[in-house]
Amino acid sequence: MPHAYQKKPTACLVLADGTVFMGQGFGATGVTVAELCFNTAMTGYQEIMTDPSYAGQIVTFTFPHVGNVGVTPEDDETADPVADGMVVRWTPTDPSNWRAVGQLSDWLSARGRIAIGGVDTRRLTRAIRAQGAPHAALAHDPDGNFDIEALVAKARGFAGLVGMDLAKSVTCAQSYRWDETRWAWPDGFGRQTEPRHKVVAIDYGAKRNILRCLASAGCDVTVMPATATAEEILAHSPDGIFLSNGPGDPAATGEYAVPMIQDVMQKTELPIFGICLGHQILALALGAKTVKMNHGHHGANHPVKDKETGKVEITSMNHGFAVDSQSLPDGVMETHVSLFDGSNCGIRMTDRPVFSVQYHPEASPGPQDSFYLFERFSASMQARSA
């Protein structure tokens, strides 16, 4: 029986520079256009596809065995996939895992997401590293009929993520409470029945596991939309404010998020904790700047150094923008840096319990080296109430 790459192509990935990758399509049919990135994580493809931070992006998985453990609702980070498409080395095999309730191909098809297998992902990853995250069109047609010129034009016509506010497209429509805690053997997810702190989490594209980590750290969590005002947030009388992860250009989302944060900080001295997009928006609110990265950081094996303790953490990351550490104002210090490229990975104010990190301490997927940050946030609220 021929391998996937020997069969007639039923999908193609076309980059804006005209480069074409042919392969086997699975999931939904049709065409999608987005920015193309790569993720080096060896696990967690379902969590990655449902991470709202990937809105506007097609994800290339460098690990070849994607789909081998199937899918389960427990691993969804939001209700449906948010990443626009998937690129893998091999088309998925039948799943082999006791938690699986379905196949990746069927899951993608039911949720309208296109995928392509049989692609030389090593070559593609090198291209992304060399030229930066390209704009791309991904097409799946079971009959193998593709208009390459039209697909190149679609890729070139993609507006890109710079200047794009995507948080409004993935945020919650209305406020809600969250009390589910992290998964633990053998009982699965638990419930926070004795919270110590009231936290308002601003949803710029929040992952469920981040909310679970907050609950596990003793927080009674109220999730509010990205456009919530300072008055609406403070009406809940929170002990702390959390700024979530999310997609798009932080400067664009900052048009409405930055004034809210500045207003909250003028009226209170509440502890504030931000992750990923929340980190970038907090930095903007404090007077720093953000920049678009060449190809971003996407993976679950990124070493980050804590400059204050010297400790090195292996972290999970997903971001295409970064805080410019050279733009940090007086009173704001850099706390963490990437050991891959020296880019900023954390800040804190020197005189207030306000801090944030670029990476994902909820580790979904990834290592759990950084859960202490949720405990630090909880401790800062405890200290303020003492």
Image: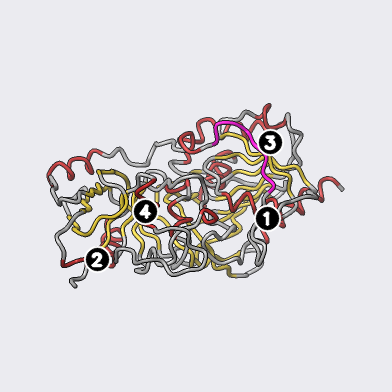
Q: Quarter of the image containing the N terminus? A: bottom left
Categorize mark 2 by other alpha carbons within 10 Å: few (<14), some (14-19), many (20+): some
177 shown above or below 22? above
Q: Amino acid at mark 4?
A: Asp
Q: Earlier in the sequence, mark 3 or mark 4?
A: 4
Q: Which residue is mark 2?
A: 120
Task: Name the element at disc 4.
Answer: helix
Q: Which residues are magenta?
A: 172-179
- Label 2, label 1: how far apart the Cα atoms are: 39 Å
Q: Which residue is mark 3?
A: 265
Q: Earlier in the sequence, mark 2 or mark 4?
A: 4
Categorize mark 1 by other alpha carbons within 10 Å: few (<14), some (14-19), many (20+): many
Q: Nearer the viewer, mark 1 or mark 4?
A: 4
Q: Which residue is mark 4?
A: 106
Q: Nearer the viewer, mark 2 or mark 1?
A: 2
Q: Nearer the viewer, mark 1 or mark 3?
A: 1
Task: Say which quarter of the image contains residue 267.
Answer: top right
Q: Amino acid at mark 3?
A: Met
Q: Amino acid at mark 1?
A: Phe
Q: Which residue is mark 1?
A: 374
